[in-house]
């Protein structure tokens, strides 16, 4: 399993949050996140798995192919420590 440091996790979550603000539950393609951040897809997948496990993000598919934040989570979003 690829390692994702806290900076990478924070940046991925911030990008998904930014892209999700256009609609209450706007889905963002995991591949788009990887491409925009110039990261390997498996690194983004690791961040997504971690965020979903913590209840911070919604994901669709296995492995997830798109992600979003719940509308309530957008207003309370804080990057991980």
Image (spheres, rainbow, N blue to C red):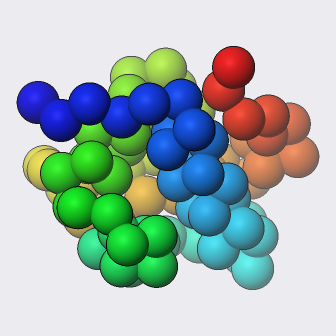
What residue is shown at x 22% (from left), y 61% (from top)?
41
In which quadrant of the rendered image does the C terminus lie? top right
**Which of the two residues, 48 or 72, is positioned nearer the viewer here?**
48
Name which quarter of the figure residue 49 lies in: top left
Q: Position of residue 29 (x, y in %)?
A: 37, 74
Residue 57 in sight in this render: no
**Which of the two residues, 36 or 61, is positioned nearer the viewer here?**
36
What residue is shown at x 72% (from left), y 68% (from top)?
18
Q: Is residue 70 above or below residue 50?
A: below
**Quick check: 38 left or right of 16?**
left
Q: Position of residue 77 (x, y in %)?
A: 79, 40
What residue is shown at x 18% (from left), y 51% (from top)?
42
**Quick check: 42 left or right of 36?**
left
Residue 63 in sight in this render: yes
Q: Is residue 47 above or below residue 70?
A: above
Q: Is residue 69 above or below residue 16?
A: above
**Quick check: 10 left or right of 63?**
right
Q: Position of residue 51 (x, y in %)?
A: 46, 32
In which quadrant of the rendered image does the N terminus lie? top left
**Which of the two residues, 8 or 61, is positioned nearer the viewer here?**
8
Q: Position of residue 8 (x, y in %)?
A: 49, 44
């Amino acid at each position: 399993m690829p390692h994702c440091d806290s900076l990478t996790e924070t940046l991925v979550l911030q990008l998904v949050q930014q892209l999700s603000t256009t609609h209450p539950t706007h889905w963002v393609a995991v591949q788009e996140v990887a491409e925009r951040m110039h990261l390997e897809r498996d690194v983004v997948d690791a961040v997504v798995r971690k965020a979903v496990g913590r209840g911070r993000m919604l994901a669709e598919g296995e492995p997830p192919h798109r992600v979003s934040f719940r509308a309530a989570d957008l207003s309370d979003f804080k990057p991980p420590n």
